[in-house]
Image (cartoon, rainbow, N blue to C red):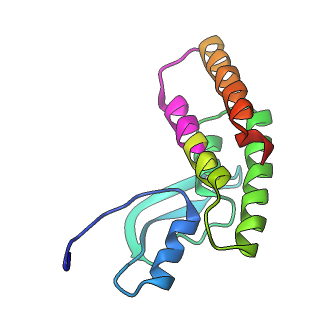
Amino acid sequence: MEGVLTLLTSHFEEISELANRHPQVRAVHLQCDAAADGSLRPRYSVATGPLEFSGGYGIAAAVAAALPSELLEDARSLRETIVQESKKDHTLRPQDLAMCQAADELGELARAPLGDEQLAAELETRRRAWFEDGVGAC
């Protein structure tokens, strides 16, 4: 179908590559500034092109949500693995897609009104599920 407008929002940086491969795709982003703690501070304005932030938007959101430091370190390590692998092959592997889903789940947990104990229990439940599904082993 020609002329269909579709909007997609994601913290998954590789999606921005679609604009490089397909002339009908345009990338835009919400402008942000990097803070000293690794989080992003929104400027509430839109700009063309992908967000130029090397730390990973999902991780910055997790920092802003004050998720546990052990979880952040695991996320940074897994992100680095995905970045290195994506440089070798531009196809998304099932593990990469699973990592995106895991990052989305972490974002949902960060926004959920949970107490510390509830959050810890949810994180442990999800960690076990991810490792059983092979997400944590990629």
In the image shown, does 31 or 91 lie closer to the viewer? Answer: 91
How many numbered discs, if any?
A: 0
* Residue 43: % across, % down: 44, 61
User: What is the quadrant of residue 70 in the picture?
Assistant: top right
What are the residue bounds of the magenta stretch? Answer: 103-115
Report if residue 56 lies within the magenta region: no
Q: Quadrant of the N terminus?
A: bottom left
Report if residue 110 lies within the magenta region: yes
In the image shown, does 111 or 127 lie closer to the viewer? Answer: 127
Give the side of residue 80 with respect to residue 66, left or right.
right
Q: Is residue 69 above or below residue 89?
A: above
In the image shown, does 8 or 21 lie closer to the viewer? Answer: 21
Q: Is residue 8 above or below residue 99?
A: below
Residue drawn at x 53%, y 69% is 51
Q: Can the viewer see residue 72 in this picture?
A: no
User: What is the quadrant of residue 19 in the picture?
Assistant: bottom left
Which SS type dominates the magenta stretch?
helix
User: What is the quadrant of residue 91 in the picture?
Assistant: bottom right
* Residue 107: % across, % down: 53, 38
Q: Can the viewer see residue 1 in this picture?
A: yes
Q: Is residue 67 above or below residue 90?
A: above
Residue drawn at x 64%, y 73% is 90
Give the side of residue 81 with respect to residue 60, left or right.
right
